[in-house]
Image: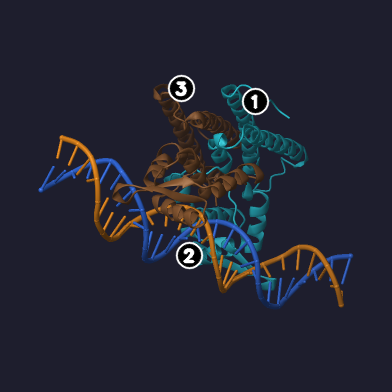
Chain colours: A brown, B cyan, C blue, D orange
Amino acid sequence: MSLRHALLGLIAEMDGASGYDLMKVFEISLGTVWQATQSQLYGELGKLTEGGLIEVSAEGPRGRKEYSITPAGRAELRHWMVETDPKPHRRDEVLLRVFFLDQVAPEDALGYMDRMIDALSGRLDDLARLEEIVPWEEEGGLTGNGRLTMEYGKRFMAMRRDWFVWARKQYEERRPGTASEA
Amino acid sequence: MSLRHALLGLIAEMDGASGYDLMKVFEISLGTVWQATQSQLYGELGKLTEGGLIEVSAEGPRGRKEYSITPAGRAELRHWMVETDPKPHRRDEVLLRVFFLDQVAPEDALGYMDRMIDALSGRLDDLARLEEIVPWEEEGGLTGNGRLTMEYGKRFMAMRRDWFVWARKQYEERRPGTASEA
DNA sequence: GACCACATGTAAGGAGTTACATGATTAA
DNA sequence: TTAATCATGTAACTCCTTACATGTGGTC
């Protein structure tokens, strides 16, 4: 039930944001660590308002509703941050397939690992290019930790790519005679 | 919809397994990359049987049903493995909290990062100890890739711990004057 | 006036969790 | 005979996704 807390944190940070505004943040920056769809978001905003954790602080054109966090909401946010333990969500489709590598032909298995290595390398390149463009320093309150998560993304992808390279080698060593890369 | 494929892969590997057998595998080895509950598992076994991807190949005491994969199931498993792209599930509660670090007091923020660092260090130690005990080499068909995923776990946790140490330093540098570790 | 961006919602269905419910076999 | 393990299932509920549905305000 963390979408609740993602919204709470975002509204705390961006006082007066609308559902539409929040949605854009999910699409751009927050989406890398917690994704949500539009319908989920509006539903949760309703529940948070009902529960008194946020409130409609202003209304604008086109039915726009601007939200602010309430004291109760701020208390809940802090409670979540410092008094509850995050439970890792153990579900990784990429790794799951590795588990079943022996169920397909060797060329399929090697092909899978090669595709993963290529995809990770590509995304690492994209990130490096993106990093040069993004205007750091001029942090408008929100981007301070965006920088931390971008660094995380880089380390994560590099770790995975290196691991896949290692795993591929292990796979080949266990079955000598299989032709190497295409 | 990957629980379906996790079961398919497992049944391909362990011909004649029952729901109960599969559940134990989820609890022990597979659970680190794909978790599932008992009720979900039995439900999915029913759907897979209906869909003709697996079949009840034998029945035993206590209503035990042993499953085998069908040719259709094997085709679906291969299709999934080599012809579909795994989509990363972007949801990480640990990272989500980092996003909102500026919404709590500095001592709470540092406390959070310290707890994460400690937890990761502890789990790394556990893994190292476990690795010495586990009997490698005598692989009974299943454990070959268990070794790969264990190495992944090690690298993953080490990467996260190192990143948290770095992130903590970044946090402190941005707000000088905050007292260091307890 | 047409179009794009803004803006909010509902409906239906699938995936996942927690709790409940039941019973058979085996070994001490 | 008692307890542990084996063994399967259902019910209720929440979470999440996809698709549909509708309308307003600003700007060219």
Look at label 2 and name its amino acid: Gly
What x and y, as percent, mark residue B79? 44, 50
Tell me the residue that label 2 is attached to. B52
Residue at horizontal 45%, vertical 52%? A45
What x and y, as percent, mark residue C8? 36, 53
Give me the chain letter of mark 1: B
Quadrant hosting residue B146? top right
SS for dot 3 = loop
Tell me the residue that label 1 is attached to. B178
Query: Which of the two labelled residues, at mark 1 and mark 2, occupies the earlier sequence position?
Result: 2
Residue A86's label in the rendered image is: none
Quadrant hosting residue B22? bottom right
Quadrant hosting residue A119? top left
Look at label 1 and name its amino acid: Thr
User: In this rendering, which labeled residue sits more in front, label 3 or label 2?
Assistant: 3
| B175 vs B136: above or below | above
SS for dot 2 = loop
Look at label 3 and name its amino acid: Glu
Tell me the residue that label 3 is attached to. A137
What crowding class fits label 3: few (fewer than 14 Cα within 10 Å), some (14-19), or many (20 or more)? Answer: few
Give me the chain letter of mark 3: A
What crowding class fits label 2: few (fewer than 14 Cα within 10 Å), some (14-19), or many (20 or more)? Answer: some
Mark 3–mark 1 Cα distance, whole angstroms, equals 21 Å
Determine whether label 3 and label 2 are within 8 Å by CB.
no
| A19 vs B166: above or below | below
Mark 3–mark 2 Cα distance, whole angstroms, equals 58 Å
| A119 vs B178: above or below | below
What crowding class fits label 1: few (fewer than 14 Cα within 10 Å), some (14-19), or many (20 or more)? Answer: few
Quadrant of the frame with the C terminus of chain A: top left
